[in-house]
Image (cartoon, rainbow, N blue to C red):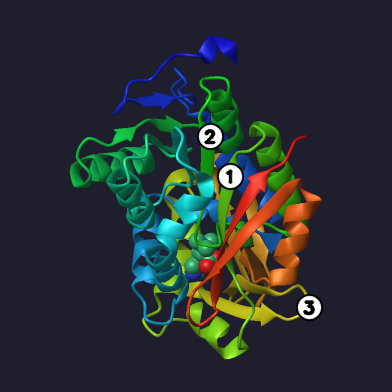
Amino acid sequence: MSKNLKIIESGEILDLQARHIPCPKSQKEFAIDVLIGLSHSPKRLPCKYIYDERGSLLFERIIACPEYYLTDCEVEILRTYKEEILSKVGGGKINLVELGAGSGEKTKILLQEMIAGNIDVTFIPIDISSSAIRDSTDSLKEQIPGIKIKGLVSEYFKGIRWLSNLDRCTNVILFLGSNIGNFEPAEADVFLSSLWNACNDGDYLFIGFDLKKDIRLLLNAYNDSGGVTAEFNLNLLRRINNELGGDFNLEEFQYYSTFDAISGAIKSYLISQRKQNVVIDEINRLFFFKSWESIHTESSYKFLVDDIVKLASRNGFEIIEHFFDSKNYFVDSLWQVKKE
Ligand code: AVJ
């Protein structure tokens, strides 16, 4: 770790993932995860692989769908409570760290408020995708002149640990958009306790949760009338075709998503509409699909406030405040790391 320590200048991007070998490590991981997922019964694929360049653009289009209420709610929360949120985290030197940087639109609301309030802030987007970091860094530098940005291309925890070795700032970590909902419950605990370990006492986590609500609203959000969410999920198979030499016929797979009331999650699937074989060259495998056999592609967990309270306390965080939108569809919760 300490060998990696190097002060990065504002505007510079440090790539902790850089490898000087022709076959990137990430490509091998993709192949292995596809092999494991399609060999599993029932078949499954990790949703993180939806997000190549095309997948990220499709997600931007989902955000623009009228049925997908999550982003609008969170933007409303940030616009309404930005001053209150910032008054809670105090006025010292702050690292605003964003996990899974996205387009930076929501973060911009907080950053502009901090800069207007003369808070000494450095924005640190952390993402394993260097193109995502490059894009959000470039657009924010353009939109907020004089902003200090240090992009970190790294796995989340490696990046945060690197930060806490670096300086004595308060870290305010953003994990927005109900991205936490993509983890299975046991994985969410591993994620939060690892985050706690990487943080210093007194650091903050500002984390978004989509709340349980009328099931019709939930179902509509994942079944938009324009079929964008279907395309988004199918992008997984397209990526396997393009990057791993797969021969999935996308027309033969139907997107289906449903609310599982027992686990409390929207579960999304790609379903083989007929009996077929799929060859994936890069992993030297042929996969057999029965007719109507499913591949689980994504879980999007929905929460009760009570679930959130337990999640925080179980993993060593103290809840400072919940910020709700006016419809009570979504909550951004401000937590503080307690180590003493
Ligand atoms: C970005 C993970 C929060 O689960 O709602 C949107 C992704 N999937 N539509 C979600 C997604 C289908 C989204 N998250």
State how far apart marks 2 and 1 are (Cα): 8 Å
Residue sitting nearer the eye, 100 or 56: 100
Q: If you read the primary sequence from the N terminus, does the residue marked by circle 3 or circle 1 appear first?
A: 1
Residue bearing mark 2: 170
Secondary structure category for the residue under label 1: strand
Tell me which corner region of the image, top left, top right, bottom left or bottom right, holds residue 277.
Answer: bottom right
Cα distance in 3D space between marks 2 and 3: 39 Å
**Mark identifier at residue 262:** 3
Tags 2 and 3 touching, CB below 8 Å:
no
Q: Tell me the residue at 37%/65% (across/down).
A: 79
What's the residue type where badge 2 is placed? Answer: Thr
Quadrant housing the C terminus:
top right
Residue 40 seen in the current view? no
Looking at the picture, does residue 29 appear above or below residue 36? above
- Residue 281, percent across and down? 53, 44
Q: Is residue 293 left or right of residue 327?
A: right
3 or 1: mark nearer the eye: 1
Choose top left, top right, bottom left or bottom right for residue 284.
top right
Label 2 crowd (10 A; few <14 / some 14-19 / many >=20): many
Q: Which residue is mark 1?
A: 204
Q: Mark 3 Cα within 10 Å, few/some/many (few <14, many 20+)?
A: few
Label 2: state its secondary structure: strand
Task: For the residues labelled 2 and 1, say whether their Cβ atoms are less than 8 Å apart.
Answer: yes
Q: Inspect the image, locate mark 1, and give the three-letter code of the amino acid beneath it.
A: Tyr
Label count reads: 3
Examine the image and state in which quarter residue 225 appears. Answer: bottom left
**Of all residues shown, which one is farthest toward the top?**
3
The CA span between labels 3 and 1 is 31 Å
Residue depicted at x 40% and y 24%: 14
- Residue located at (57% from left, 59% from top): 278
**Residue 30 seen in this snapshot:** yes
